[in-house]
Amino acid sequence: MHGDPEETHTVLRELNAANVPALNDYSHAAMMEYAVVEGDSKKGEALGLIDRDKLAQTISTLLELGLIENDIPLDRVIDYSILPAEVGSLTR
């Protein structure tokens, strides 16, 4: 996320012509502004953190919207035991 994103933007454009420079610049800036990838350390977030409550809410929302037919237990979606210790401890 840090440094020159142009190499990534080039690959994205090769994969999909709709990934024009303005879109890539906007997306990168938004991900940085909202700490989408690395999280906000002031809120206890970290790279790789997948919050149980947020994931459960996402599943609930997908169910409510009819995008999935049945509730999905979290242990079928993610295995928290494979996360690095420093991230895994944040998921409890």
Image: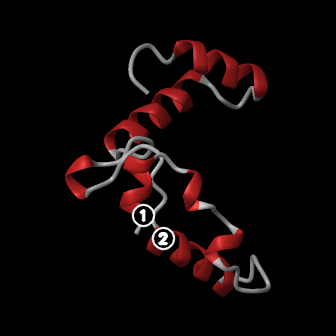
- Residue 33 spot, x, y in % from top left: 32, 41
Report, in whole angstroms, how far the alpha carbon at label 2 lies from the one at label 1.
6 Å
* Mark 2: few/some/many CA within 10 Å (<14, 14-19, 20+): some
Type of amino acid under label 1 = Thr
Quadrant of the rendered structure where residue 3 is? top left
Which residue bears the numbered disc 1? 91
For this rendering, which residue is in front, 39 or 91? Answer: 91
* Mark 1: few/some/many CA within 10 Å (<14, 14-19, 20+): some
Secondary structure of the residue carrying tag 1 is helix
Q: Pointers 2 and 1 in contact (CB under 8 A)?
A: yes
- Residue 36 spot, x, y in % from top left: 42, 46
> Which label is found at residue 83?
none
Type of amino acid under label 2 = Arg
Q: Tell me: residue 29, above or below residue 34.
A: above
Q: In front: mark 2 or mark 1?
A: 1
Quadrant of the rendered structure where residue 65 is? bottom right
Q: Which residue is drawn at 70% across and 79% down?
A: 72
Which residue bears the numbered disc 2? 52
Residue sitting farthest toward the left: 42
Q: Tell me: residue 20, above or below residue 62.
A: above
